[in-house]
Amino acid sequence: MAGTRGLLLGCIADDFTGATDLANNLVRAGMRVVQTIGLPADGQAPDADGHAPEADALVVALKSRTIAASDAVAQSLAACRWLRAQGAEQIYFKVCSTFDSTPAGNIGPVLAALMDELQCRFSIATPAFPDNGRTVFKGHLFVGDVLLSDSGMRHHPLTPMTDANLLRVLQAQLDPAGGRQVGLIDHRSVATSAAAVGERIAALQEQGVAMAIADAVSNDDLMRLGAAAKGMAVVCAGSGLAIGLPANWGIRPSAAAAVLPAAAGRRAIVSGSCSSATQAQVAAFIAAAGSAWALDPLSEDAEDAEDATTSAIAAWAQQQWQARPDQPLLVYSTADTAAVAQVQASLGVAAAGARVERALAAAARALVAQGAGQLIVAGGETSGACVQALQIDRLRIGAQIDPGVPWCHAALPLRPDSGLHLALKSGNFGGSDFFSRAFALLP
Ligand code: ADP
């Protein structure tokens, strides 16, 4: 019976939205999942009463993708030790599906350190996520129809990916003194059976190979790889491999894994994303006569002004909800490219971002204080700021709204009785009716 199962899978994700993406896939594959934001400060199990949460998988969201490799190793090892102390039988190191990294790391150094920690002699790495157009063939990563090195990732500001050959990419990140060789589990084995993958792994180990890039071009490939990874102390993957692991513990997809507490309270949306998908969602909400408060970044030129705006938003929300308690309210800074450029020219890019994030996070707190119990936040950075302002340190993951975006539930000091339902949508996710569909999904 699910309730009595202990923790099975311990996951370490190198960024926040990647953690949610992984958690979402695990829930869809039938696991009950709790995501923590960083490591719980007290090192305790993430439930208030000190007991391990009822979860098959715990996902620790780090922010370690682009920090110094030594820091990423230290944080990942701390997470690994904590997850093992909670009872995790297998560790899943979640990286980006475009294998975002540099010759200095952080994928290779972190995976090597986790293998050392767990005395794991062989591990696999695959960012494949066919549902999202990420496939690996002959060790080369494709984004849609093009090689990684021909995709937009070539120009990424922090982790430009100019080589699609993942064996070369991973090998370059490994300390030559460590002596670890990277090999390939090619598609012939992966397409055949889990046993064929096992034979390939044995052959690679005989050649002195300790890590292998695994090909996968379909979900069936990921299922066979997942079966072959049974008992492997640590695996490294994008969120795709998650679909193939739960079956190793006899877990099948089930709606029960996604059950959250009943939703309560008012409905609100905070949007700081300026991505085109979010622009369309905000426009659709306003076109449908939704009540919206537009935040003007340029008028907020002092902290006092921000406080005044937050109070004004609180008063507005109270009045709106008194008139119509069921209506969702939107507070947004979402704007088109020209408007954002104007704000950035006036304030500077970083200062503009920080100011808007602070104002939206304060608005989120004010909305929750006025009774919001169901909150959608649009924007990756905006989500981080709101989660921090609301003092949320863990989320239970529920049903998917759109690919990659699940409803979550958090305990909350501001709402001690029923907590908060939260959907954290990174910029370009979701159709234009995302807001209304999301609320309609909550009972
Ligand atoms: P996305 O997921 O779409 O990238 P983010 O929240 O991660 O969204 O990033 C959007 C960034 O743009 C945030 O730092 C936010 O504060 C900033 N921002 C939002 N609205 C405006 C605006 N009107 N002018 C300038 N910057 C803005």
Image (cartoon, grey):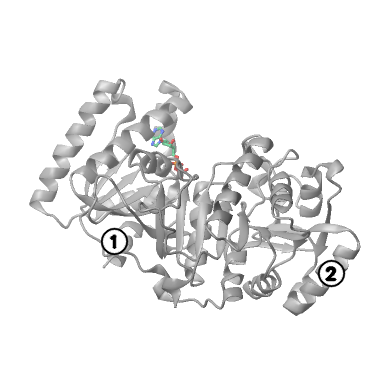
Image quadrant in which the N terminus is located: bottom left
Disc 1 target residue: 439
Q: CA distance from mark 1 to mark 2?
A: 50 Å
- Of the residues under marks 1 and 2, which one precedes in the sequence? 2
Vertical arrangement, residue 137 with respect to residue 69, above or below: below
Q: Is residue 244 left or right of residue 275?
A: right
Q: Amino acid at mark 1?
A: Phe
Residue at left offset 48%, top offset 59%: 404
> Which residue is rendered at x = 44% and y = 72% of the image?
4
Is there CB contact under 8 Å for labels 1 and 2? no
Identify the residue at the far right of this view.
207
Amino acid at dot 2: Ala
User: Between 80 and 245, which is closer to the camera in this rendering?
Assistant: 80
Question: x, y percentage for residue 347?
Answer: 41, 22
Regarding residue 280, the answer to whether it shows in the image is: yes
Residue ID for mark 2: 202
